[in-house]
């Protein structure tokens, strides 16, 4: 039956608190039972009252169960909404991180982006980013954050000491729970280590850590998925950075010897000479050519010739300062730039290089030697336009003088140009 507002009795019943509904039902049933007691025998009245009370109690229990079920469903819905909101926030942060990583030019830029995102997603965890070095025998620390009272992370890690890198999967180090712990792990710290893999290769390691206690393992298990998402985004960025570095190296380096190529050395020579002119220091150039290299290739094969070139390059790099530049200028010709070195010092250095190259004869079982020419700005050359040409001319003079020797370009005269005078 409906009321004037169009609401049924059951709809109005569901709209009120269950305690109020139960009280009304109980009061109605009790009234009905007392009324019936006036007209019915006492036994029938008591039975009616008992039935009415049982019915009202059953209705109250049913109402309570329905309400409890509805409240549980509401709680589950609220929890699902909160989880969906949290996941949406995580996805937005990861998308923003991926977008920022596209502009990262190096490991430092990528580490800064990771630190900013990880601090927002995992505010209660410390973190660190490790990246493989060029030889891939060590992981170097790029950045770390939120360390607080925890021990500072190691500056480098050995790949063979990390279970996460060995397995290629996330690994939890928690001494309190007696898990398998890496040898580089610090005491009193629980951490999850996630390898960063892309295109089948590991580029780095993400570490999230907290204090080791009875709840640390469960906390790390909860954030492991977020750490994997961060590592996946970072792995692609590190892969792109590595590829760019490789392309940049190929554009500047000779693939056979690993020395700089001609294009690079011509650019850096101009900078060194300009810097020397401002500071008043000399800049020397040594042009080097291996003697009878074609004959060596014909007799022993090009494979041995390539090996000799690589060993010569190693000898030159080992004998020079870190500030000096060695380049493969073309074929078997090598060029050395010595900033802050005058012509006499360059002559001594050139003779040292010649002796080191000659020692390779015993190693390879063939005569190996080199002729060298030296030129210096400003002692023998005026600038970048003629210093290489003068060093090359001195090299040809060394060839003409019997090879396996060092010659230097003639020094410039101190004559001043005549100045015009006014005729009176």
Image: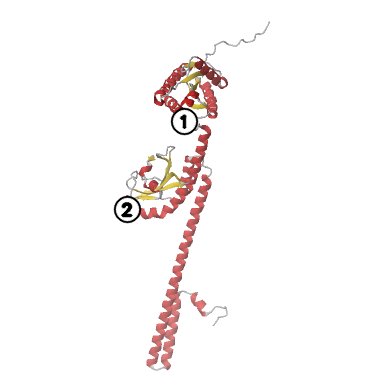
Identify the secondary structure beneath mark 1: helix
Is residue 151 among the parts visible in the rendering?
no
Above-or-below relation of 338 to 410: below
Q: Closer to the camera, 171 or 160? A: 160
Left/right of residue 251 with respect to residue 139 in the rendered view:
right
Image point (49%, 43%), residue name: 239
Q: Which comes before the other along the chain, label 2 or label 1? A: 2
Q: Quadrant of residue 418?
A: top right
Locate the N terminus and report the quarter of the image it occupies: bottom right
Of discs 2 and 1, which sits in the foreground? 1
| Location of residue 175 in the rendering, given as x and y in whole percent from the top left corner | 32, 50
Is residue 240 among the parts visible in the rendering?
yes
Residue carrying label 1? 303
Residue carrying label 2? 177
Specify the label residue 64 is tagged with: none
Q: Are there few (<14), some (14-19), or many (20+) residues within 10 Å of tag 2? A: some
Image point (52%, 49%), residue name: 96
| Location of residue 14 in the rendering, given as x and y in whole percent from the top left corner | 49, 75
Residue at the far right: name it: 424
Residue at the far top: name it: 424
Residue at the far front: name it: 299
Identify the secondary structure beneath mark 2: helix
Q: How is the image coloured?
A: secondary structure
Locate the C terminus and report the quarter of the image it occupies: top right
Q: Are there few (<14), some (14-19), or many (20+) residues within 10 Å of tag 1? A: few
Above-or-below relation of 39 to 246: below
Q: Quadrant of residue 202?
A: top left
Image point (51%, 35%), residue name: 250
| Location of residue 326 in the rendering, given as x and y in whole percent from the top left corner | 48, 26
| Location of residue 390 in the rendering, given as x and y in whole percent from the top left corner | 54, 18
């Amino acid at each position: 039956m409906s009321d004037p507002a169009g609401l049924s009795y059951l709809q109005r019943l569901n709209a009120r608190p269950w305690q109020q509904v139960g009280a009304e039902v109980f009061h109605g049933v009790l009234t009905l039972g007392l009324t019936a007691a006036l007209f019915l025998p006492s036994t029938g009245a008591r039975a009616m009252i008992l039935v009415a009370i049982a019915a009202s109690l059953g209705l109250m229990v049913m109402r309570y169960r329905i309400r409890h079920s509805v409240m549980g469903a509401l709680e589950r819905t609220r929890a699902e909404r909160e989880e969906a909101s949290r996941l949406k926030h995580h996805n937005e942060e990861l998308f923003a991180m991926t977008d920022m990583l596209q502009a990262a030019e190096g490991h430092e830029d990528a580490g800064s982006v990771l630190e900013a995102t990880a601090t927002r997603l995992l505010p209660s965890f410390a973190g660190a980013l490790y990246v493989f070095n060029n030889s891939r025998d060590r992981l170097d620390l790029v950045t770390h954050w939120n360390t607080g009272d925890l021990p500072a992370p190691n500056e480098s890690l050995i790949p063979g000491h990390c279970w996460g890198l060995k397995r290629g999967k996330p690994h939890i180090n928690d001494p309190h729970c007696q898990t398998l712990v890496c040898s580089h792990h610090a005491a009193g710290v629980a951490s999850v280590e996630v390898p960063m893999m892309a295109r089948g290769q590991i580029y780095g390691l993400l570490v999230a850590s907290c204090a080791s206690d009875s709840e640390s393992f469960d906390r790390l298990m909860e954030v492991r998925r977020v750490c994997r998402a961060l590592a996946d985004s970072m792995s692609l960025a590190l892969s792109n950075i590595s590829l760019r570095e490789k392309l940049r190296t190929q554009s500047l380096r000779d693939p056979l010897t690993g020395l700089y190529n001609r294009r690079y050395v011509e650019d850096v020579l101009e900078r060194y000479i300009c810097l020397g002119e401002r500071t008043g220091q000399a800049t020397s150039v040594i042009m080097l050519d291996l003697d009878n290299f074609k004959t060596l290739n014909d007799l022993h094969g090009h494979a041995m010739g390539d090996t000799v070139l690589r060993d010569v390059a190693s000898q030159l790099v080992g004998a020079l300062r870190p500030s000096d530049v060695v380049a493969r200028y073309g074929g078997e010709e090598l060029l050395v730039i010595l900033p802050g070195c005058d012509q006499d010092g360059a002559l001594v250095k050139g003779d040292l290089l010649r002796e080191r190259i000659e020692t390779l004869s015993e190693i390879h079982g063939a005569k190996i030697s080199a002729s060298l020419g030296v030129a210096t700005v400003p002692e023998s050359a005026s600038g970048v336009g003629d210093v290489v040409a003068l060093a090359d001319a001195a090299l040809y003079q060394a060839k003409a003088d019997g090879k396996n020797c060092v010659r230097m370009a003639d020094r410039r005269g101190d004559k001043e140009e005549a100045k015009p005078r006014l005729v009176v």
